[in-house]
Amino acid sequence: LKDIEFIRSNYYNKLEIARFDSNVGKFVGYTEFGVKQANYWNKDTSYIAAMKAQREGYCLNNVGID
């Protein structure tokens, strides 16, 4: 169960602009706009904590479904 990760990707016009990875623990931007958004989201510690909690709340609860 340690290798399970939660990834949330944000897209605009079919281009990934930013991604949250539970292993990294923060948002990473892939475009100029995405970097700005990632920096904004990373400053909000409650939002980052909520994203980290999604791994337990979403991923680990659904492990046995498949």
Image (cartoon, grey):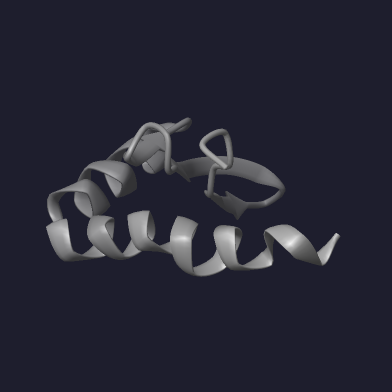
- The residue closer to the viewer here, 27 or 3, is 3
- The residue closer to the viewer here, 26 or 3, is 3
- Looking at the picture, how far across and down is residue 45, in whole percent? 14, 57
Which quadrant of the view contains residue 28? Answer: top left
Task: Give left or right: position of 45 versus 35.
Answer: left
- The residue closer to the viewer here, 32 or 57, is 57
Residue drawn at the location 31% of the way across and 65% of the way down: 50
- Compared to residue 55, the image places residue 17 above or below, namely above
Q: How many numbered marks are there?
A: 0
User: Farthest residue in the right direction?
Assistant: 66
Which quadrant of the view contains residue 5? Answer: top right
Residue drawn at the location 51% of the way across and 42% of the way down: 17
Residue drawn at the location 48% of the way across and 43% of the way down: 19
- The residue closer to the viewer here, 32 or 66, is 66
Residue drawn at the location 68% of the way across and 66% of the way down: 62
Task: Give left or right: position of 6 versus 14.
Answer: left
Point out the image quarter for the N terminus: top right
Point out the image quarter for the C terminus: bottom right
- Looking at the picture, how far across and down is residue 7, in whole percent? 55, 47
- Compared to residue 33, the image places residue 45 above or below, namely below
- Compared to residue 55, the image places residue 33 above or below, namely above
